[in-house]
Image (cartoon, rainbow, N blue to C red):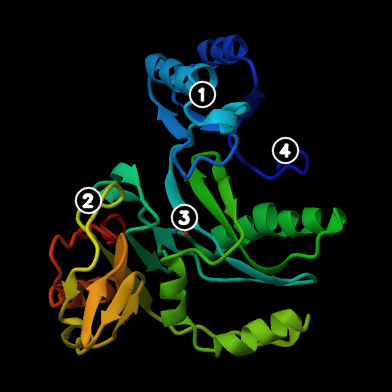
Amino acid sequence: MRDVGIPTADFSVFTNYDEAMRYVQEKGVSIVVKASGLALGKGVAVCRTLGEAETALKEIMLDRVFKDAGTKVVIERYLEGQEVSIHALSDGKTHVMFPVSQDHKTIGEGDTGKNTGGMGVIAPLSFVSAELMQEIERMIVKPTFDALRKKGIEYSGILYPGLKLTSMGPKVLEYNARFGDPECQVYMRLLKTDLLDILDACVDGKLSDQQIEWNTGFAANIVLVSGGYPDEYKKGLPITGIGEAEKVPGVVVFHASTQHQGPALMTAGGRVLSVSAVGATLKSALDRAYEAVGKVRFEGMYFRRDIGAKSL
Ligand code: GLY
């Protein structure tokens, strides 16, 4: 991103604890400390005080809690702003933008607590104008595909940059190389064209010939998780009410971690179901989704009650 001028947080990379600490003292907080290797999503600390930063750096670099994943540490400026998910589909030559969506990543209401795989999504976002989407495409999406092509990488499939909309413009937080989950579920509710035709066109390198139509209106989904998630939780608990939930107009329930045991349906993981709804307005989509959520039951079921609330 730095090499090709794609906007992201200011950052520096360190392998030495003393140098990392000096940098933090010089730059001040809020900052984000990341173990550069893979750490099961746990290697990122948002530090609001110098003390928190010192603890994070000590744990990663001196105590080696993430072992070799912490040999290199990335220290970034913390970005303030709304987090949004961008999805673009590419056949290696051209790309198409999907509508913008917003996941709610933390377990607690008001965006508090531990990070999860995603607790609920809304799309599209009324606070992201067509002009801003064009800017995101021009400053982030297109330069990313161009840079990949220059490196000889033919990128075919979904590119999903996670952005923060800061007062200094949109900036990349991360790149994913897949459909976001649960973002993908709301896209499936808004997509009018058959997904298979689009993916076929993508594989054949004919994306520029493919029309992609979206339904008007809004989609929302609410993720139902097992009590305790993202830490320890129980599995194998009976689920009821999905049929009733799907009788609410506009509602489709997606299964994430369920399993049949004879005729009964059981929980089989942390994120169990996603209750999605479409509506002419965001409010009607959310009202329908929450009405349907009220019909589903399993022991310890938890969900956030504030999905999309900031956008209403
Ligand atoms: N929705 C978050 C993710 O797929 O990473």
Quadrant of residue 102 in the image? bottom left
The amino acid type of the residue labelled 2 equals Gly
- The picture places residue 199, in percent across and down from the top left corner, at 64, 82
The local secondary structure at tag 3 comes to strand
**Quarter holding the C terminus?**
bottom left
**Quarter holding the N terminus?**
top right
- Where 139 falls versus 210 (above or below)? above
The amino acid type of the residue labelled 4 equals Arg
Residue density around tag 4, few if under 14, some if 14–19, many if 20 or more, within 10 Å: few
Judging by the rendered image, the residue that carries numbered circle 4 is 2
The amino acid type of the residue labelled 3 equals Val
Residue density around tag 3, few if under 14, some if 14–19, many if 20 or more, within 10 Å: many
In the image, what residue occupies the spot 44% across and 66% down? Answer: 183
For the residues carrying marks 2 and 3, which lies nearer the camera in this image? 2
Nearer to us in this view, 194 or 254: 254
- The picture places residue 58, in percent across and down from the top left corner, at 47, 17
Q: Earlier in the sequence, mark 4 or mark 1?
A: 4
Cβ atoms at labels 4 and 1 below 8 Å apart? no
Marking on residue 84: 3
Q: Earlier in the sequence, mark 4 or mark 3?
A: 4
Nearer to us in this view, 110 or 154: 154
The residues tagged by marks 4 and 2 sit, at their Cα atoms, a distance apart of 39 Å
Marking on residue 64: 1
Residue density around tag 2, few if under 14, some if 14–19, many if 20 or more, within 10 Å: some
In the image, what residue occupies the spot 54% across and 67% down? Answer: 179
The residues tagged by marks 3 and 1 sit, at their Cα atoms, a distance apart of 32 Å
The residues tagged by marks 4 and 3 sit, at their Cα atoms, a distance apart of 21 Å
Judging by the rendered image, the residue that carries numbered circle 2 is 228
